[in-house]
Amino acid sequence: QVQLVESGGGLVQAGGSLRLSCLASGSISFLSIMGWYRQAPGKQRELVARITRNGSTNYADSVKGRFSISRDNAKNTVYLQMNSLKPEDTAVYYCNVDNRRQWGTEDYWGQGTQVTVSS
């Protein structure tokens, strides 16, 4: 099992910034893709950004140019720097990782961290 602990959420005014962190621990084999998803009330969970082990990234169109994802492989940690936040960014943000093993890939989710952007 891999455990994910997220931190960095909170309440911020529109235009402000937050940095989310997600630390993976436990039975880690090879963390291939690490990413962030979010779910707003009444909406489906959606991809925000993800990053491969070698640093390739992709972003949702709604956050391009404002959010930046990065990772520290030595620390098994993925970050999401969120700038120019908007009220529509309000959601629970979830960390997601793929742990690759010889027989396949395991998918893990964090417990979620609330991000609230006030107007």
Image: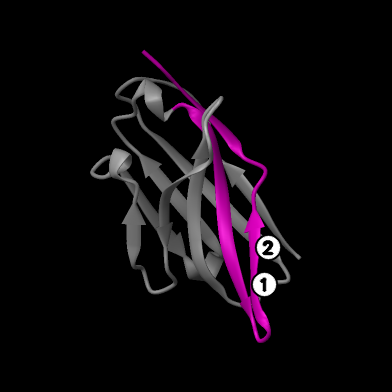
Q: Which residue is mark 1?
A: 28
- What residue do we see at 48% from left, 55% from top? 35
Name the magenta segment's main secondary structure. Answer: strand
The answer to whether residue 53 is seen in the rendering is yes
Residue 44, how many percent across, how many down? 53, 37
The amino acid pointed to by label 2 is: Ser
* Element at label 1: loop
| Image quadrant assignment for residue 63 | top left
Name above or below for residue 10 compared with residue 75. Answer: above
Name above or below for residue 102 compared with residue 117. Answer: below
The colour mode here is one colour
Assess whether mark 2 and mark 1 are in contact (beta carbons under 8 angstroms): yes
- What residue do we see at 58% from left, 41% from top? 7
Q: Which residue is mark 2?
A: 25
Question: Quick check: is 97 in the magenta stretch?
Answer: yes
Query: Badge 1: few (under 14), some or many (20 or more) residues near its Cα, within 10 Å?
Result: some
User: What is the span of residues highlighted in magenta in the rendered image?
Assistant: 90-119
